[in-house]
Amino acid sequence: MTGLKLLDERRRQVFEKGSEPADFEIACGKPSLSGAVSQRACVFCGSRVVLYPIADALHIVHGPVGCAAYTWDIRGSRSSGPELHRMSFTTDLRETDIIYGGEKKLEAALRQLIARHNPRAAFVYGTCVVGVIGDDVDAVCRKMTAECGIPVIAVHSEGFKGTKKDGYKAACDALWRIVDSGETTEKRPYSINILGEFNIAGEAWILKEYFRKMGVEVVSTFTGDGRIDEIRNARQASLNLVQCSGSITALASRMKSEYGIPFIRVSFFGIEDVSKALYAVADTFKDNKDIMARTRALVSEELSVLLPQLEKYRKDLTGKKAAIYVGGAFKAFSLIVALRHLGMSVVLAGSQTGNKDDYETLKEICDEGAVIVDDTNPVELCKFMLEKGVDLLIGGVKERPMAYKLGVAFCDHNHERKIPLAGFEGMVAFAKEVHASVMSPVWKFAPRMEAKP
Amino acid sequence: MSTKTKLITEPGREVTQDACRVCAPLGACLAFKGVEGAVTLLHGSQGCATYIRRYLISHFREPIDVASSSFTEETAVFGGKANLLAGLDNISRQYTPQLIGVATTCLSETIGDDVAAVLRDRVPADPEEKCKVLNVSTPSYSGSHADGFYRAVRSLVSALTEETSEVFTQRLNVFPGMATPADIRWLKSLFKAWGLEAVVLPDYSDTLDGGLWDTYQRIPSGGTSLAAIRGMGGAECSLEFGHALNPADSAAVWLEECRGVKRLLLGAPVGVAASDLFFHRLQALTGRDFPADLSAERGRLIDAYADGHKYVSGKRAAVYGDADLVATLALFLLEIGVTPVVCAAGGPVSAFREVMKGLVPDFEERGMEVLSDVDFDHIEQATARVGVDFMIGSSKGYKAAKRLGVPLVRVGFPIHDRFGAARQRLMGYDGTQRLFDELVNTLLSHTQEATGLGYSYM
Ligand code: SF4
Ligand code: SF4
């Protein structure tokens, strides 16, 4: 590779499809390199992502002020009822608490907040400092569970104790405790849970509507528009759909081994993947012929509306090049397919938290010459965007200004977004957004375009 | 005025609900962005750096790189020295910076890492390395982002400014505080026009509000040069904007004590009176007449005050955010006939009441409530209790304002839900003019919507 130099330690986390050595194996899942500007967050962030959308629970961050302040209402997870999740609570530890411990403060905070807000459960996120001052958060939680009569659950999410993935794991453990406290295990026929669906911009509602039309009951969504009581009922479902696999597979596996609920991995981004997901559900319930018939009708109706709409976008976008850098690799797969549908090719793809299998799959579905990166940083990202001459970057808030600085279009595909991108209508929204950015006339003033004759 | 909030008794100190401040390392990152060729390394876990970047990026809409020494469990147990050293070498290789500013986080402070000692004994992996490394202590459990900002500026000066016996007249140090890039730009061109050789620190007017790039810039160009900081000891005096800043965190105080440069402390020039004071200082320094175009600007502002006074006169406001800005805005509001009935500093500011009493001796008689170290829950309750016509401060007050049914004028940091925060102008007669226009228009638009009569004139 030419141009800017990579840090030596990063060489095994980057490759170009077609030119990597035969025995190359990507070294992913490593902690971020000290001094590199990783786009990753921390364990706490992973836990927050998964649990945050539960709207009738109290989420309190036990630690100094920052961890809570930076995560106050930063995600687009919508609720149809209570909105407790959009508030920010923290024990806001001070110097004396660091010296004498924060347990008393946490206890008092929980008591006050539970009395004031009446939540159905409370999650206590322990952050870095709590991990080193020796607070027994579990003991406080046990005490408050007994005192307040709601589950008060410690989420061990000290930032330094791993990566975002470990935060997912901690969140799954917390969720498990609620799921497992459900009373009945009687199965409801033709029913599902959707795991890893966070109802960003109301996406869960779009999906629920599809399943309603198919005649499939959605028992609970994890955790979009989530309610504690619904989560308790989750064990009554006959099937688990797992989206955003990285974050929540641990929970699905546990529900499979303990309750025998099978799970399938799905994605609701892009036409193929949505259709595939819906058919997979219908197929699982194939003893009910009506479900399959209704699914066919649904898909064909949606497609008849959707395809003509996409056509006008595809005309303009054909031949354009895209870069993708997202949190989970699974999302990247769907995006590659979806972009292909718009006539675009992906020349750079990566994720913050993918594993070896993910990168194998990524390699398979990418075109020759595509660069694939794990846990990249701004220097690398910009280097490859320029080298590959991309027209579009798909990423999150931290990547956005890099794209714009280089005069490259951008589409937000992280949890902060305000536009629903899931389902068939989401595909139209996605196409529209990509089109609006890529085709904007402002890029002609960008230095890299002006330099061209 | 309507309020739907359930009023409860004063919240206890055990919990912070919707904080009105963020943490100290963020302030340090912002300050270091204003130094040429500088990169910040946060000594702690990855998350803090990423969250802080995200928070700053959402306000400035510019790429902002902040490195982390990426603590792991081992680091937390055995100390962060190895990570810190590795981090410095990696930054130095990847960015070839002129300066690395190391700011601590709660974690590295709590485990007791002695960053200063590590830096003192450090032997760079690359013997050719020319970069200067300095550190600032920014534990967030004592202080807010504003404290981190001031401390970082002070650490820059105390680490770099050389001793000199020479004093250059017409050379000036300027510490504008957490000013917007546009205000910093304005200050710079103003000093230039007045023939003053001014060093503004920090100066992120280009790095956080610059043009597009044709190639990747590891470190965007712009910022106060290290040479300029080194030479700050030879200035005639230091102008420092602020009302509430702790002298122990002040760069100008350090320069006065250790380099003998006279410190002139004054409030940021927002409003007629504060701008007059500022320009008189400049006149005294330069011996110049008041420029005609400035007189005209001043005239236009007062004309606007006259044209708009009825829309604001007798109104009541809640002003919140960083202590210095709160004090600055309170004075401006009083100047136009608005009573800032709630003046709330989000961070723990020692003696904020005394500071406000010094500025507005009869503040109690005027019914002004002065608060510090309060969250938005507290601010909202105080505001609901006394009733206001509008709120003024960062965008984080939006939810409270919405619940209270009053309009919000967005000023300061952060502004995450509107466009153009980096270009906001507050200082000088023309900056005040824009602020006044926006304030009046916000009130007009609120009335227009609220009456539902659809008047199309005012
Ligand atoms: S640990 Fe401290 S430095 Fe890090 S985000 Fe939290 S408050 Fe800020
Ligand atoms: S202190 Fe730890 S938990 Fe909090 S943001 Fe920083 S890394 Fe994450």
Image: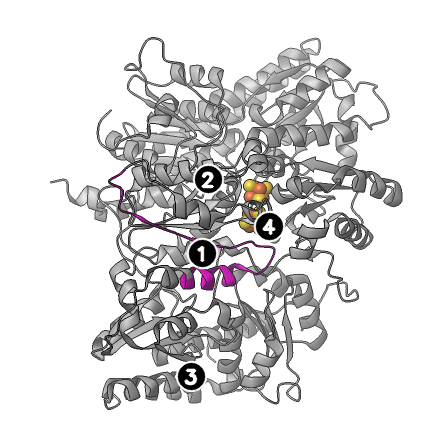
**Mark closest to the chain's N terminus, 3 or 1:** 1
Q: Chain of mark 4?
A: A
State the residue lying farthest toward the left. Answer: A453
Residue B42 at what x, y percent from top left?
46, 46
Residue A206 at what x, y percent from top left?
59, 34
Q: Residues within 10 Å of mark 2 (few under 14, many from 20)?
A: many
For marks 1 and 4, give the one nearer the viewer.
1
Taking depth in this image into account, of A206 and A142 the one nearest to the observer is A142
Circle 4 sits on which residue?
A: A72
Q: CA distance from mark 3 to mark 2?
A: 43 Å
Query: Label 3 sits on what residue type?
Result: Ala
- Name the image quarter holding residue A39: top left
* Residue positioned 75% across, 26% down in the render: A234
Q: Say which mark, if any, is on residue B28.
A: 1
Query: Label 4 sits on what residue type?
Result: Trp
For marks 3 and 2, give the one nearer the viewer.
2
Q: CA distance from mark 1 to mark 4?
A: 21 Å
The reply to whether dot 3 and dot 4 touch (C-beta < 8 Å) is: no
Magenta highlight range: B127-154
Q: Say which mark, if any, is on residue B274.
A: 3
Query: Label 1 sits on what residue type?
Result: Ala
Circle 2 sits on which residue?
A: B69
Mark 1 lies on a secondary structure that is helix
For marks 3 and 1, give the one nearer the viewer.
1
Q: Residues within 10 Å of mark 4 (few under 14, many from 20)?
A: some
The answer to whether residue B5 is left or right of residue B234 is right
For marks 3 and 4, give the one nearer the viewer.
3
